[in-house]
Image (cartoon, rainbow, N blue to C red):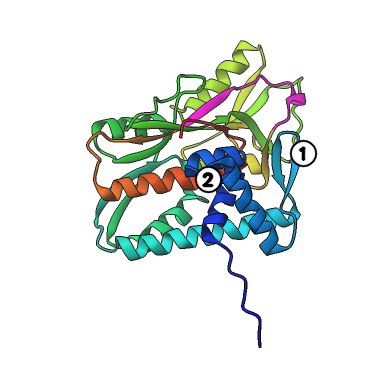
């Protein structure tokens, strides 16, 4: 008689994902409304099912083993598919229109997957997406022209207050960005490839260079981020951006290039006061949840959730 397959427990897989994405078993217990010992027992059960150690202790923290990392990737996919299946089954009657804005940094890699998943779960909801710069997206939300917007706040400024209308998801480092192997020549003006003005990153970088007495010259400007990336990849100049959405051929410059520090910028999720329908609420939750992994990969500091 053939042995029955082992079925992994969905609640345990969800606890695993939350624990690894939010800093350990204690944080997972807080988010799931359980005790830390209960989460630890779930993880022990999971290790018994897999037959491999999934965690190792590093001081007070717990990190995944190679087997744990492998299982975590599958767990994320299983949990996401479970949630999408439930949303699709429960949400087909949900309709309406959601107007949402995004920064260019998220438009190419992250946005298609998120909106595709949302559409499969809620095919009757019409999504109107706009791509723009932080200040104009925030203004459109305030004016009621957008229901939701992911937008950069002001560099070094106060983050958005965590209210029904705005929350800071993360703090992203602002960096000098160049191709792999780039070396800045301290004897020559720094070549800059920048977005067209007005651009917060452009203004901030130039102000920091001027404040440090570092000569510079603009060698390329573009109205679009894709054009900017192409110019930097071609070696036309250094640019100023966060690590969010960087092409694989580009990277933040290390401190040894002797360029001024640029600080950090908050990434904020804004919602119009009048946008309170179920379609907006659902997309709002998906945007906040799905950014966790990509923000951690971009070196983000945790913000208000």
Q: How crowded is mark 2: few (under 14 residues within 10 Å), some or many (20 or more)?
A: few
Q: Quadrant of residue 36?
A: top right
Q: Which residue is drawn at 34% across and 49% down?
A: 282
CA gap, disc 1 to disc 2? Answer: 21 Å
Above or below, 142 relative to 287? above
Above or below, 86 relative to 106? below
Depth check, front residue: 177 or 288: 288
Is residue 77 found left or right of 63 in the rendered image? Answer: left
Q: Quadrant of residue 162?
A: top left
Does residue 191 show up?
A: yes
Is residue 215 found left or right of 112 in the rendered image? Answer: right
Kindly identify which residue carries mark 2.
226
Is residue 163 found left or right of 10 in the rendered image? Answer: left
Quarter of the image with the N terminus in it? bottom right
Magenta segment includes 263: yes
Under circle 1, the secondary element is: loop
Residue 78 pos. (x, y %): 54, 62
User: Which label number is shown at residue 181?
Assistant: 1
Residue 225 pos. (x, y %): 51, 41
Does residue 227 show up?
A: no
Residue 230 pos. (x, y %): 59, 45
Magenta segment includes 84: no
Residue 152 pos. (x, y %): 46, 31
The magenta span reads: 253-267
Above or below, 67 relative to 34? below
Depth check, front residue: 85 or 118: 85
């Amino acid at each position: 008689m053939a042995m029955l397959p082992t079925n992994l427990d969905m609640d345990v897989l969800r606890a695993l994902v939350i624990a690894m994405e939010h800093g350990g078993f204690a944080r997972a217990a807080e988010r799931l409304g359980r005790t830390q010992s209960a989460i630890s027992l779930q993880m022990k059960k999971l290790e018994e099912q897999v037959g491999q150690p999934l965690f190792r202790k590093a001081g007070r923290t717990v990190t995944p083993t190679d087997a744990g990392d492998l299982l975590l990737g599958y767990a994320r996919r299983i949990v996401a598919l479970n949630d999408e299946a439930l949303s699709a089954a429960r949400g087909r009657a949900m309709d309406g229109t959601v107007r949402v804005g995004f920064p260019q940094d998220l438009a190419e890699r992250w946005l298609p997957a998120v909106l595709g998943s949302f559409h499969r779960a809620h095919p009757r909801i019409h999504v109107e997406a706009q791509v723009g710069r932080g200040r104009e997206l925030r203004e459109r939300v305030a004016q009621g022209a957008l229901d939701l917007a992911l937008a950069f706040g002001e560099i070094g400024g106060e983050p958005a207050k965590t209210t029904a209308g705005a929350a800071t998801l993360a703090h992203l480092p602002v960096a000098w960005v160049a191709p792999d192997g780039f070396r800045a020549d301290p004897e020559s003006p720094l070549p800059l490839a920048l977005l067209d003005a007005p651009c917060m990153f452009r203004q901030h970088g130039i102000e920091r260079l001027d404040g440090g007495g570092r000569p510079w010259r603009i060698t390329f400007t573009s109205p679009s981020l894709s054009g900017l990336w192409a110019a930097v990849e071609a070696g036309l100049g250094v640019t100023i951006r966060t690590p969010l959405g960087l092409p694989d051929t580009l990277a933040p410059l290390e401190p040894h290039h002797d360029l001024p520090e640029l600080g950090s910028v908050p990434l904020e999720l804004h919602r119009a006061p009048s946008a309170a329908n179920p379609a907006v609420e659902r997309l709002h939750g998906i945007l906040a949840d799905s950014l966790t992994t990509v923000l951690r990969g971009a070196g983000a500091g945790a913000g208000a959730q």
